[in-house]
Image: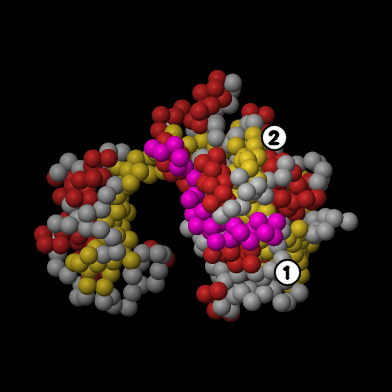
Amino acid sequence: MIRALRIAGAGGFWGDRHDALLDQVCGGSIDVVTLDYLSEVTMAMLRGRRLRDPGSGWATDFMAALGPALPNVVKRGIKIVTNAGGANPYACADAVLGLARDRGLRGLRVGVVTGDDIFDRIDELYAAGVTLDNVDTGAPLITVRERLLAANAYLGAEPIAKALGAGAQIVIAGRCSDSALALGALLAHFGWADDDWTRRAAGVVAGHLVQHGAQASGGNFAGGWEEVPQLARLGYPIAEVDESGELEVSKHPGLGGQVSSAVVAEQLLYKVGDPRSFVTPDAVADFTDIELEDFGDDRVRLHGVRGFPPPDALPASLAFQEGWRNVATITFVWPYATARARATEAILLERCRNLGIRIDAHHVDLVGLTGAHGPLAPAPAGDPNEVVWRLAIRTEDRESARRFGAEIAPLVASGLPGACRGTGSLRPTPTPIISFWPAQVPRAAVAPSVEVLVA
């Protein structure tokens, strides 16, 4: 019988803790570490960076995490699988190879997975009948074609397994499903059959549990955060999967956090729409019969995952620019902080109308009063000591967004008293609004490619 595989999660988004990788590598026995950096909007940002700089377009945070850990990774033979390649996996791989050579770690093998980027094939696909309509609204892509920023199909685990099977110790992918990072390692290790949907679904669940940083080991825990020990030294989760697909979640001893059935259940339902049908490119997982068995000592075993074949089409993540935004913040202090903040909205919007500044929509938050919950918040008992007034606008006209920002600083002296600088600039600058366009692309229309490079 093939031994179980221990897969550690060390990053769930771009901006997660860099030192989590070193903690996982040095904290105890593991075989694989996964790091997830991508979101739908992130892909559009990365593609824009690559267009401005051919060597950019990947998640540079990965190098900050990898640098301190790489010598131990190589020495212990730990595999790393990440989607840090973003819109430029080869540039990310070049950075890793350069780091290895600088450290004298010759012979390190780095796998590169590509084929997810379909932006330059949009017209070709459309001519072949792949319309990439919005799966939520049914709207045709032609309505946003000229404003399209990025287009990527979600690859599955097979290319990652192929790279590992070819001897790669570090695998760098672009857009793939979050769970594919772990499932690819499991497929390479166990060789599960192409149609073994239940075991593949178990691998999907394992990847889902370690995919979002420390959420499966006590981070962001809503069910009793005050009982999670040592959050300042939070350990990240580890999924141990055996050949049958049985799964146990734990963390390294000596680090903070908590692995309990409640914590694991909360992460299990993270981003899940229909628990009977968690759809990925590799399998459809049914969560409804999963049982959680709490062993104590930060160990939880999962039973009862069921799996089914995935759809013929792959999900595709497209992003387009939908105008511009600008956001102003000013703090108003007592007395009458709320009344003066609300009056400032009317003053500013009237000035913008008089100046011909186009505002298609706006939204006001009174942070400290009703900013988070709006009308659901309980009525305040009295006038607050201070309130942060935040007004956000959207417009199709970039110049209007810029001119709106120029009208904020004058409010301090030509508006109402008691106004002072808020949490942002008094001269805010516009930023593009990047919107998500969910679509589907036939599996046969996407051709993943794998190459293994050597330091």
Q: Quadrant of the N terminus?
A: bottom right
**Residue highlighted by disc 1:** 300
Q: Is residue 236 visible?
A: no
For mark 2, does the 10 Å Cα neighbourhood hold few (<14), some (14 to 19), or many (20 or more) residues? Answer: few
Given residues 62 and 367, the one toward you in this image is 62
Q: Looking at numbered disc 2 in the image, what kind of residue is underneath it?
A: Asp
Q: Colour scheme used in the picture?
A: secondary structure
Quadrant location of residue 117? top right
Q: Residue furthest right?
A: 1
Q: Is residue 449 visible?
A: yes
Left or right of 275 in this view: 66: left
Residue shown at the point (41%, 29%) measured from the top left: 146
Residue shown at the point (63%, 65%) measured from the top left: 24
Quadrant location of residue 375? bottom left
Quadrant location of residue 447? top right
Measured as percent of width and height from the top left, residue 84 is found at 55, 48
Q: CA distance from mark 1 to mark 2?
A: 34 Å
Measured as percent of width and height from the top left, residue 382 is found at 28, 77
Which of the two discs, 1 and 2, labels the residue nearer the N terminus?
Answer: 1
Span of residues in magenta: 52-77
The mark found on residue 312 in the picture is: 2
Left or right of 323 in this view: 246: right
Given residues 428 and 67, the one toward you in this image is 67
Residue 8 part of the magenta-drawn span: no
Q: Looking at numbered disc 1 in the image, what kind of residue is underneath it?
A: Val
The mark found on residue 421 in the picture is: none
Please say if 444 is above or below 361. Answer: above
Are the two marked residues, 1 and 2, in contact with CB atoms closer than 8 angstroms?
A: no
For mark 1, does the 10 Å Cα neighbourhood hold few (<14), some (14 to 19), or many (20 or more) residues? Answer: many
Nearest to viewer (mark 1 / mark 2): 1
